[in-house]
Amino acid sequence: MPKKERQRLLGKLLEENPFLTDEELSEHFTVSVQTIRLDRLERGIPELRERLKTVASRTMNEEVKSLHSDEVFGDIVDMELDKRALSIFDVTEDHVFQRNGIARGHHLFAQANSLAVAVMNDDLALTVKSTINFLKPVKAGDRVVARAEVKKESLGEKRTLVMVASTVNDETVFTGEFHMYRTTDRKQGELK
Amino acid sequence: MPKKERQRLLGKLLEENPFLTDEELSEHFTVSVQTIRLDRLERGIPELRERLKTVASRTMNEEVKSLHSDEVFGDIVDMELDKRALSIFDVTEDHVFQRNGIARGHHLFAQANSLAVAVMNDDLALTVKSTINFLKPVKAGDRVVARAEVKKESLGEKRTLVMVASTVNDETVFTGEFHMYRTTDRKQGELK
DNA sequence: TTCCGGATTAGCACTTGGTACTAATAGCAG
DNA sequence: CTGCTATTAGTACCAAGTGCTAATCCGGAA
């Protein structure tokens, strides 16, 4: 097997299974341990212990994250109940597909949906139906600004329509219509 | 500080942060490294390297599930590429509104959306547009089963329609239409 | 007071899975 | 034959330990 091919496979193998020692790897490829070390050196692949450290720290971070991200997805920076609201969501590496670096749709949806729930001046607001459009891909590092607007003229009792538009650098990347259900039956515009 | 108390704290500390070496721990408790080792021995706490190994393997196990389908929310239990797929998502306290115990919409959406992406036999599948319905509230403890079906007769080139229906105890709680974009332009039914 | 025992500390040999470096060898191309 | 690359071998060293023995400290009972 040519060297290049072996190194490529080595990288792939270790990505799938970071627990392999150089010795195990040398047996797998039937080369010497030193060759494996040279290969790792050339490809910048760290040693077993370092690999485990990074994998383990990834876990710890994610566990913290899934706990933290509780009520609202994205920071609400401005809100006028029953009228409009604005939230900001910074996209990081954690939110994108590894393969193409594009943010997963459900994160944009989560931001918009959370904002729609929050802007409703109601104890128990639920999303009933929604139509959404992903207009442009969002990348890691982008700052997504979602604007929600409550449509006054909308729908019957206990139903409210909230429109959300999300932008990155003033370019619209996402729009959504959220049909919300509220428990308290209340006339339009009346504050709680 | 009494020995018992120190050992209790040691256990707690290492659970939160498994990355600490005996030396760092000895400084933290202002005792010798040997004392820390005796403490670990008595409490059956493994050494740093073993701790990282178990933490890392925990990650990998979780990632194996999402490896198949590239970052899926919910476990995919069955899948026939380009045809249909099924995933399970167990709702916990973390997924519901504290106030009313009802699952946040974006979790159901995330499960369905991830499944729609996974079922597409494509390297780069993106959601373009989606219409969803939340039919019944989902509570903590519920097991949500999402079924995705690729509609063969659907849409133009590079576009595919995926229908997803999610049920709890055979009752439909959520339905969604996902208009997916694929990069590889390919005839219907043709396998990669 | 003296002696005992648990707790603590110290020291040494050894282990794993490496790094860093040097040197030797094999195989092929010009 | 020379030069070059790839591979292999061997040495010293490191981190973070285990395992074991031995010394020390300190408080309470005889």
Image (cartoon, coloured by chain):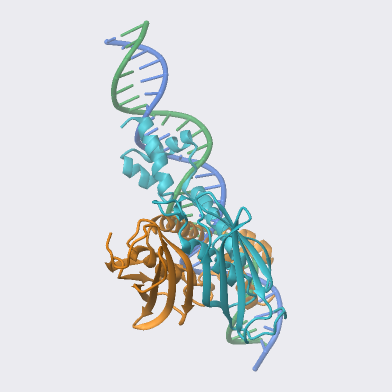
Chain colours: A orange, B cyan, C blue, D green
Which of the 4 image quadrants contains residue B113?
Answer: bottom right
Residue B164, given in percent of the width and then of the height, sits at 60, 68
Vertical placement of residue C1 versus A18, above or below:
above
Write the residue at 65% across / 73% down. B150
Camera-side residue: B173 or A2?
B173
Q: Position of residue A151 (x, y in %)?
A: 36, 73
If the image is split into quadrants, where does the C terminus of chain B sit?
A: bottom right
Percent of width and height locating residue A18: 56, 61
- Quadrant in which the N terminus of chain B appears: top left
Give the number of callouts: 0
Residue A141 figure quarter: bottom left
Query: On screen, B139 above or below B2?
Result: below
Residue A34 appears in the rendering: no
- Report if residue B4 is visible in the image: yes
Left or right for B121, reference B74: right
The residue lying toward the viewer, choosing from B28 and B171, is: B171
Residue B66: x percent and y percent? Answer: 57, 63
With B163 as the anchor, is C28 left or right in this view? right
Residue at image position (66%, 76%) is B151
A20 sits to left or right of A85: right
The residue positioned 38% from the left and 30% from the top of the image is B4
